[in-house]
Image (spheres, rainbow, N blue to C red):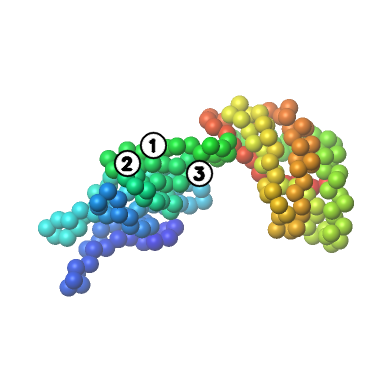
Amino acid sequence: MGEFGGGAWFVTPDGHAQTLSSENIEGVVEFGGSRYLLRGLGHLGPGDGAILRMEETADGVELRRMVELPAAPDNIAVVGEHLLQATRAGVAVVSTSFEVELHPYATRRPWPSELPSGYGEEVLALVEQEHEPLQRCLAPLRALTDRCPTRAIPAGVSLWLETSQAGTVTAIIPFEAREDEHHRPPTPEVAACIQRVAATWKLPPLDSGWTTFGLTLEPD
């Protein structure tokens, strides 16, 4: 089990071991009256997975691959006659006939598998271009610096840029709606000011859906 390694073996009462799979096996689940192994690997974002049915044979047990999963199977539950998997894009619903339907989350924050080339550079270029207006937005944060006299943790604001498929910034969302780990308070008025600046930005278009882009801004 785990990110790498692991496998599955069938062991008879007399101690004979039969290798069923040398692929990464994350667990076992009972579904629709049968038992299945969950095979998957999630590593640095990308992931893959599958459901394998255990079938008895004259010699022991063999595995039959039933369906590919949209992500590594580390978030799975059986609910009634369906198997549900939580993924970054939505909930995958697997029926007993192993048809998979993906139900997107009711949010505009699914993350694309890969950002367009130069996306980050475009964001940074726009931030540099709008340096003075953004600094005016951040001015209220300078008073907070007194709480950190060493400036090891300068006052700042961490934000998501919520972006449409066409590349338009539609919202600026603070990372947290409470004080963060460094006891910096939420600053919705600063976020609103930054959103007014970013409303005219045009970022590279996305193939589908929406994305968010993390950004931390500090006075000066």
Residue 67 visible in image: no
At horizontal 45% and vertical 46% (from top left) the residue drawn is 86
Residue 213 at x, y = what percent?
Answer: 64, 40
Closest to the camera, between mark 2 and mark 3, is: 2
Instruction: Tell me: residue 109, above or below residue 49.
Output: above
Residue behind mark 2: 95
Q: Closer to the camera: disc 3 or disc 1?
A: 1
Rendering coords of residue 136 (x, y %): 86, 39
| Cα separation between marks 2 and 3 | 20 Å
Sequence-wise, the earlier of marks 2 and 1 is: 2
Looking at the image, which residue sits at the far bottom? 14
- In the shown orientation, is residue 162 left or right of residue 150? left
- Residue type, label 3: Arg
The residue at which mark 3 appears reads as 88
Q: Residues within 10 Å of mark 2 (few under 14, many from 20)?
A: some
Whichever of callouts 3 and 1 sits on the residue coming sooner in the sequence is 3
Q: Nearer the viewer, residue 185 or 129?
A: 185
For the question of whether residue 47 can be seen, the reply is yes
In the picture of the structure, the residue carrying the numbered disc 1 is 101
Q: Quadrant of residue 163?
A: top right
* Label 1 secondary element: strand
Label 2, label 1: how far apart the Cα atoms are: 9 Å
Q: Is residue 204 above or below residue 22?
A: above
Q: Are marks 2 and 1 in contact (CB under 8 Å)?
A: yes
Report the amino acid beneath label 2: Ser
